[in-house]
Image: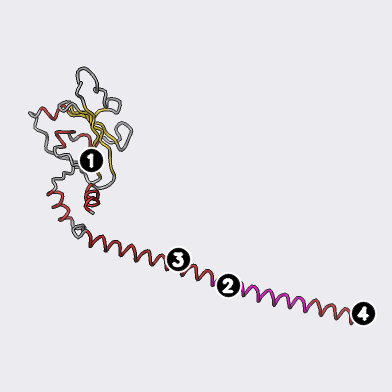
Amino acid sequence: MNRGFLAFTSFLVGGAVGAFITWKAIDKYYADLAEEEIQSVKERYYGEEKNSYQEESNDKEHKHEQYPNKTNDIHEYAKLLSKEQYVDYQKNDTESLDEEDDDTYDIYVISPDEYGDKVGTEEWNDWELEGLVYFQDGVLCDERDNPIQEVELTVGRDWVTKFGYYGDEDVVHVRNEGLKTDYEIVKDYRNYRDIVEDRGA
């Protein structure tokens, strides 16, 4: 009986030791396999990221070559704005309008409900509605992206501070009784300069 018990115990201990060694070997095999997979994924990810960065860098260099006048030099930008006669209407201009110029006093901001309410009336049978676009860099254009030349005579200057006054942060309405026109001015968060350059490309 001792011999049978000893054989059985030896069998159990041998089986346990064999199972432990097998488990350790399999564990090491799969740990190494997992580590290899992780490394290959990292190499692939960082390789793609590096390639993407290089492509982006090449794109920037190509764009710079394509548009050599597009620099961060503030003086060149100022010259361009001056040459194209752009005006920043967001600045608070301390000069008052000429009080004798009656054309400026019939231009004022109106509510969205008032916009277009003169159209078709007997008094203003030739009243017009017109949409304008106000770009991030202070340029006011018609809907075909042509800059408005005489902004103050067209829509005055109070409208710049009135976006959101009637609820919509991106729209303001202006009435010019002298021109018999209601204007809807919509903000565009792009720069006009970028649109002009994109057209030239």
Q: Residue at 24%, 21% (x, y): give it.
A: 120
- In the shown orientation, is residue 119 left or right of residue 100? right
Tell me the distance, in whole angstroms, between the alpha carbons under discs 4 and 2: 47 Å
Q: Badge 4 is on which residue?
A: 1
Q: Residue at 17%, 39% (x, y): give it.
A: 148
Tell me the distance, in whole angstroms, between the alpha carbons under discs 2 and 1: 62 Å
Residue 90 lies, with reference to residue 31, above or below; the image says above
Residue 127 lies, with reference to residue 153, above or below; the image says above
Residue reaching furthest to the left: 100
Work out which quarter of the rendered image holds the C terminus and state it. bottom left
Query: Who comes first in sequence, dot 4 or dot 2?
Result: 4
Count neighbours of disc 1 (C-alpha within 10 A) and say few if under 14, some if 14 to 19, many if 20 or more: few
Work out which quarter of the rendered image holds the N terminus and state it. bottom right
Q: Badge 3 is on which residue?
A: 45
Residue 66: percent from the left, percent from the top?
23, 60
Query: Who comes first in sequence, dot 2 or dot 3?
Result: 2
Q: Which residues are magenta?
A: 13-36
Q: Residue at 27%, 25% (x, y): give it.
A: 114
Residue reaching furthest to the right: 1
What is the image's colouring? Answer: secondary structure
User: From the viewer's perspective, is the residue at label 1 or at label 3 nearer?
Assistant: 1
Q: The residue under label 2 is which amino acid type? A: Leu
Residue reaching furthest to the top: 122
Contact check, label 4 and label 1, Cβ < 8 Å: no
Q: Badge 1 is on which residue?
A: 144
Q: The residue under label 3 is which amino acid type? A: Tyr
Residue 33, numbered circle: 2
